[in-house]
């Protein structure tokens, strides 16, 4: 439980400094310089980077034990790429549903500005390269290690929830929590943080690329996005066809996602053998023990504190639209 407490306190420290920097830097840069990317880079790179350094300074843990810097086989690289391609549509749907429920144009515009408001290279560096390094060291490194004595399902669920809360807004929480949960399983099967770094870069990088392409297309011909003068029946039929096509795509994507994840698990079980245990580091746990442990962890004071901080700031973002 000491490891869990340290992991939760690490996240709390990141969130509190993140929130503090938001209020200070928003006034310094956003209004005067209109530089959302600068604000994001300072808050998302410098803040976690400092906390990571302080974490190892105070806990005196070995980075070699916390970070799984193990090489990836070519097959694992290909499987991780394939898995990431199936994750992106699911995450997009979750984020789309969240945007619909938590309507927040200001928040949505700021998120979009991070990936489309600058050159493609700069956007990739800020929203794809740096999260693939800093956030993975934080969550598939420090946080995953904090829960490494528990069942892999517990580690995946808890690290996914904490990763979602790290984003400090409702719009990104669900997609990030899903990604964080799957990334935890990938870390478990591959025993390499390089696998989740690759996932993170591809997930964010492709989103940035798609955002730039769609923005350019939208600006090129806004009037052609929806036909005018069509009868209501034709519009209803068109919407129904689009919905059916989307449902088919979702079903196929979920099937591919499950198949790819199973292939990743099967390959690494054969490759690692006894090294790939039921838990991340320890021995097997019963289903009853897993449920009891999960309940205990969810009611841990440090996790509750992190959840309260997330909810308070997410509500603030929802009300003000500023992030």
Image (tube, rainbow, N blue to C red):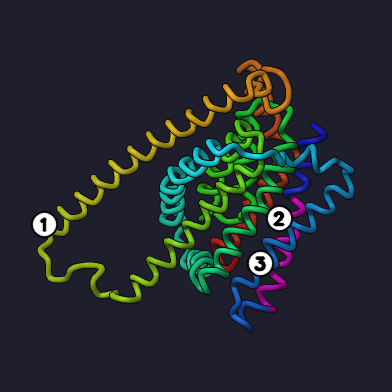
Q: Is 251 displayed left or right of 312 in the figure? A: left
Query: What residue is at 58 percent from the left and 57 percent from the top?
Result: 315
Question: Badge 3: how crowded within 10 Å, few (<14), some, or many (20+)?
Answer: some
Q: Which mark is residue 41?
A: 3
Q: Which residues are magenta?
A: 12-28
Q: Earlier in the sequence, mark 1 or mark 3?
A: 3
| Marks 1 & 3, CB-CB < 8 Å contact | no
Q: Which residue is mark 2?
A: 15
Q: Position of residue 269 (x, y in %)?
A: 58, 23
Q: Decide whether residue 124 is among the magenta residues.
A: no
Mark 3 or 2: the one toward you: 3
Query: What residue is at 64 percent from the left and 59 percent from the top?
Result: 130
State whether residue 177 is above or below residue 127: above
Query: What residue is at 55 percent from the left and 39 percent from the top?
Result: 74
* Displayed quadrant of residue 297: top right
Q: Earlier in the sequence, mark 1 or mark 2?
A: 2
Callout 2: SS: helix
Q: Position of residue 48 (x, y in %)?
A: 73, 56
| Marks 1 & 2, CB-CB < 8 Å contact | no
Q: Earlier in the sequence, mark 3 or mark 2?
A: 2
Q: Which mark is residue 233?
A: 1
Q: Is residue 220 visible?
A: yes
**Quadrant where the N terminus lies?**
top right
Query: What residue is at 21 percent from the left and 54 percent from the top?
Result: 239
Mark 1 or 3: the one toward you: 3
Label 1 and label 3: CA atoms lie apart by 48 Å
Label 1 and label 2: CA atoms lie apart by 50 Å
State whether residue 204 is above or below residue 186: below
């Amino acid at each position: 439980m000491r490891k869990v407490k340290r992991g939760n306190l690490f996240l709390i420290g990141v969130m509190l400094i993140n929130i503090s920097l938001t209020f200070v830097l928003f006034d310094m840069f956003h209004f005067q310089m209109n530089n959302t990317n600068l604000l994001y880079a300072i808050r998302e790179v410098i803040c976690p980077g400092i906390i990571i350094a302080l974490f190892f300074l105070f806990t005196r843990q070995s980075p070699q034990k916390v970070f799984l810097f193990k090489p990836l086989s070519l097959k694992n690289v290909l499987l991780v790429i394939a898995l990431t391609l199936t994750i992106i549509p699911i995450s997009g749907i979750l984020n789309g549903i969240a945007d619909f429920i938590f309507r927040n144009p200001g928040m949505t515009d700021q998120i979009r500005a991070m990936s489309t408001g600058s050159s493609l290279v700069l956007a990739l560096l800020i929203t794809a390269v740096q999260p693939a390094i800093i956030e993975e060291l934080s969550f598939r490194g420090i946080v995953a290690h904090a829960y490494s004595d528990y069942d892999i399902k517990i580690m995946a669920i808890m690290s996914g929830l904490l990763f979602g809360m790290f984003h400090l807004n409702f719009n990104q929480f669900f997609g990030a929590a899903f990604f964080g949960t799957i990334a935890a399983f990938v870390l478990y099967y591959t025993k390499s943080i390089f696998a989740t770094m690759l996932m993170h870069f591809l997930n964010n990088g492709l989103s940035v690329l798609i955002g730039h392409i769609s923005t350019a297309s939208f600006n090129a011909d806004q009037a052609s996005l929806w036909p005018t003068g069509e009868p209501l029946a034709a519009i209803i039929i068109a919407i129904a066809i689009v919905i059916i096509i989307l449902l088919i795509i979702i079903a196929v994507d979920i099937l591919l996602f499950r198949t790819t994840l199973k292939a990743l698990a099967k390959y690494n079980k054969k490759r690692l053998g006894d090294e790939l245990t039921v838990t991340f580091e320890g021995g097997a746990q019963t289903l009853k023990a897993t449920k009891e442990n999960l309940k205990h962890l969810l009611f841990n004071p440090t996790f509750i504190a992190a959840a309260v901080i997330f909810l308070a700031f997410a509500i603030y973002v929802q009300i003000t639209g500023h992030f």
